[in-house]
Image (tube, helix red, strand yellow):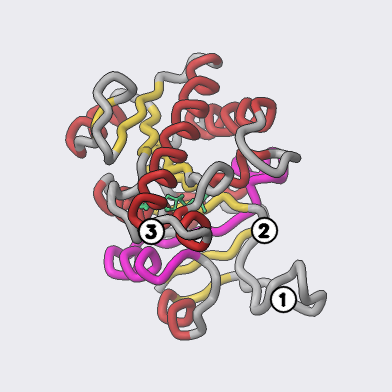
Amino acid sequence: MSRSSYKRILLKLSGEVLMGPGQFGIDSETVARLAQEVKAAKDSGFELCLVIGGGNIFRGIAGAASGMDRTAADYMGMLATVMNALAFQDALEKIGVDTRVQSAIPMATVCEPYIRRRAMRHMEKGRIVIFAAGTGNPFFTTDTASALRAAEMGCDALFKGTSVDGVYNADPKQDPTATRYESLSFNRVLSDNLKVMDAAAVALCRDNHIPIVVFNIREQANLALVLSGQGTATIVGK
Ligand code: UDP
């Protein structure tokens, strides 16, 4: 399946993308811009579901490093993803996109609990589903949650929108000679320990034949380009 023939996709946004030019939290202008791009993707015929990280607010590992119990810190991280999901839902609904948030940690007065068949139904009705609270388990990440939900929802691909335009052989911010890969195999990512997604997420995508497309979502209008098979990205596949 070529990149331009994907129909149903899971879009993973790292929490830091929501900070915009800031250093922390949620920048409403940035969220509004991203929501417009997601709407445009939906209007052009894609079926979309989303997972949003929480790193712009709280990461469990940082909490643990400052002395917190890791599991408590991870639950805080998962709650941070719920805040991001609600912010994104708000932005989407403001521009007329029917959206549902489903949380892996049930919180009945805030959003729906994660129920796979219900999520499927929402997507069939043209709604965008945002999966919040990661996998609901500590010691995991929202990357793993993205791979898991992409498999459960039968997605053709997982698009990881981040702050760099793909996967490099070294950190492009530190090393000016770093070069970007056009494509890579899952096994190469795992054996070379390349920073695409954590290993559990990559293995889950490999085992379920879900390609990962890594691209820069901070660049305006890039989502549409990358979804149409153009634009700069790295594709991780078999
Ligand atoms: N988290 C977790 N289990 C999950 C998903 C997330 O414990 O299944 C916690 C973990 O502490 C993580 C935080 O939520 O650091 C925020 O998620 P992540 O770091 O993946 O966000 P991103 O880096 O994508 O912004």
The residue labelled by disc 2 is 164
The residue type indicated by label 2 comes to Val
Q: Relative to 7, say whether 86 is above or below.
A: above
For label 3, the crowd category at 10 Å Cα-Cα, with few meaning under 14, some 14 to 19 and many 20 or more, is some
Q: Of tags 2 and 1, which is closer to the observer?
A: 2
Q: Please give the name of the residue rendered at 41% of the width and 44% of the height, measured from the top-left corner.
A: 76
Q: Is residue 227 something that shows in the picture?
A: no
Q: Label 2's element?
A: loop
Would the CB of label 1 be found within 8 Å of ligand 1?
no
Q: Of tags 1 and 3, which is closer to the observer?
A: 3
For residue 70, which numbered disc appears in the image?
3
The residue type indicated by label 1 comes to Thr
Q: Is residue 238 something that shows in the picture?
A: yes
Q: Quadrant of residue 107?
A: top left
> Could you tell me residue 78's position as x and y percent?
39, 44
| Lateral position of residue 102 relative to residue 57, left or right | left
> Could you tell me residue 152's position as x and y percent?
24, 49
Image quadrant for the N terminus? bottom left
For residue 179, which numbered disc appears in the image?
1
The CA distance from mark 1 to mark 3 is 35 Å
Q: Which region is colored magenta? A: 197-225
Does residue 149 belong to the magenta stretch?
no
The CA distance from mark 2 to mark 3 is 28 Å
Q: Relative to 101, say whether 54 is above or below.
A: below
Image quadrant for the C terminus? bottom left
Q: Please give the name of the residue rendered at 55% of the width and 42% of the height, measured from the top-left corner.
A: 57
The CA distance from mark 2 to mark 1 is 12 Å
Q: Relative to 194, say whether 137 is above or below.
A: above
Q: Please give the name of the residue rendered at 47% of the width and 64% of the height, measured from the top-left corner.
A: 197
